[in-house]
Amino acid sequence: MNKFYIKSMGCKSNQFEGQIVAEKLSNVGFEQVFVQTLADYYILNSCSVTHKSDNEALYLLRHAHSLGLITVLTGCIAQIEKEKLLEYDFIDYVIGNEDKFELSDYLKNDINFVVKDLMNASKFCKVSLNDTGKTRVSLKIQDGCDNRCAYCIIPYGRGKSRSADADYIINEINRYAKNGYKEVVLTGIHIGLWGKDFDKSLFNLLIDIENKSNIHRYRLGSLNPFEISHDMLKFLSESEKFCPHFHLSLQSACNKTLKSMNRHYSVEFYLEQIDEIVSLFNKPFIGSDIIAGFAGETDEDFETTVTNLEKSKLTQIHTFPYSVRKGTIAEKMSGHLPDEVKEERANIIKKISAKKFSDFVLSNIGDYREVLIEKHPDKKTGLYKGITDNYLKILTKQADFNSIKKLKLDKVDDDKIIAVNL
């Protein structure tokens, strides 16, 4: 009884950690299967960013249990809710966020509850991934968060900010490069806080990556606007390794709402910052997060957000309705909105995002971009998948996978970008 099926929910850090859990289990005699009904163990590496994700996790575990699988819950829900979860008869194991890397020991010894206290953790947990099965690889450089945004429960699932040291990061990047990877994505729970625990900054790390790493190109995970300086942008704009792709954790485009959320910047600040990014880089992809229907958000507040988003030079907006999280500051705020209002507002923002992304794609047609050709062809067309430096997913006849080619973005066909050789 050693076959396991693993599903990871949520952020790129969680996806990265799920790959490590799978690799570690495989290295000690467990067999990973990709059809749930063939497994003995169902492992859910959970996310707790919204109430909806909590409900989805419980549904998945209940379903797996009904199929006769032994269920293992790890990730942020396990870390936050702890032993309460064992009260559910469809959850067999509850394993904490850092404890999951020793999961094989707990399964072999039938230890069904291990959740260490991360709120006092001071050291970054170094874990390495050897094979992703992909052409791009993520590298976790930081964990935890010191901010206390009014809506967010994640600090309680991850602890305070802890950074990997620069030497470890450079060595890992160079190891990936030696193993043939062309691109690395720097991830974490709050990577803009990297180095705070030893008086360094993310900018310091970027300089080291530029000067000491052998990777062809790299991307950054999500950043708060106040963690991006003019000097950093100027430096990155002159880099031959940095991909012109930003993801800004904005959360609202109304100053009143930002203040309620305990976010320490203004809309005017980040709109100017986005303008600067656009001016310094060649058609950069600029994504963002926006929460729709936060507690106390009036019709006028939402209209302000809509107006500011429409006039912004964002490329794409990831939006979702505000979800009340037990134990957060916002839980006790007044002015909580009905679910249908939050959903309606989220849908309006999604339409703005769709228009912006469509316009961005069309603005790139006819351009030549560096494209990383990925390993697996598109099932529908048989064409090879690729990703441009500015984060556009393309299809091409170019079959030289795991190589970087300069291709012309030729046309859009059935919502797919088709790229051709020079």
Image (tube, rainbow, N blue to C red):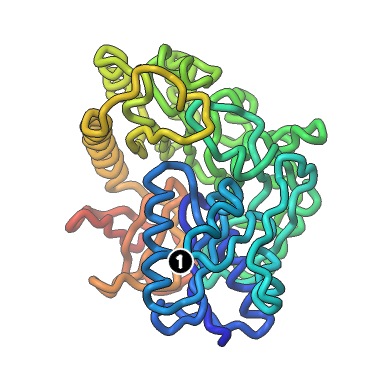
Crowd around label 1: few <14 · some 14–19 · many ≥20 (10 Å): many
**Amino acid beneath label 1:** Phe
In this rendered view, identify the residue nearer to me: 77 or 241: 77
Query: From the image, which quarter does the N terminus lie in?
Result: bottom right
Q: Quadrant of residue 64?
A: bottom left
The relative height of residue 38 versus residue 144 in the rendered view (above or below) is below
Q: Quadrant of the C terminus?
A: bottom left
Residue at the left extreme?
414
On the image, the x and y values in percent for residue 404 come to 49, 62
Coordinates of residue 393 in the picture (x, y in percent):
36, 55
Q: Quadrant of residue 189?
A: top right
What residue do we see at 81% from left, 51% from top? 167
Which residue was labeled with disc 1?
90
Q: Nearer the viewer, residue 175 or 154?
A: 154
**Residue 337 location, quadrant:** top left
Q: Relative to 389, is 213 on the left or the right?
A: right
Residue 202 seen: yes
Residue 174's spot in the image, x, y percent?
71, 60
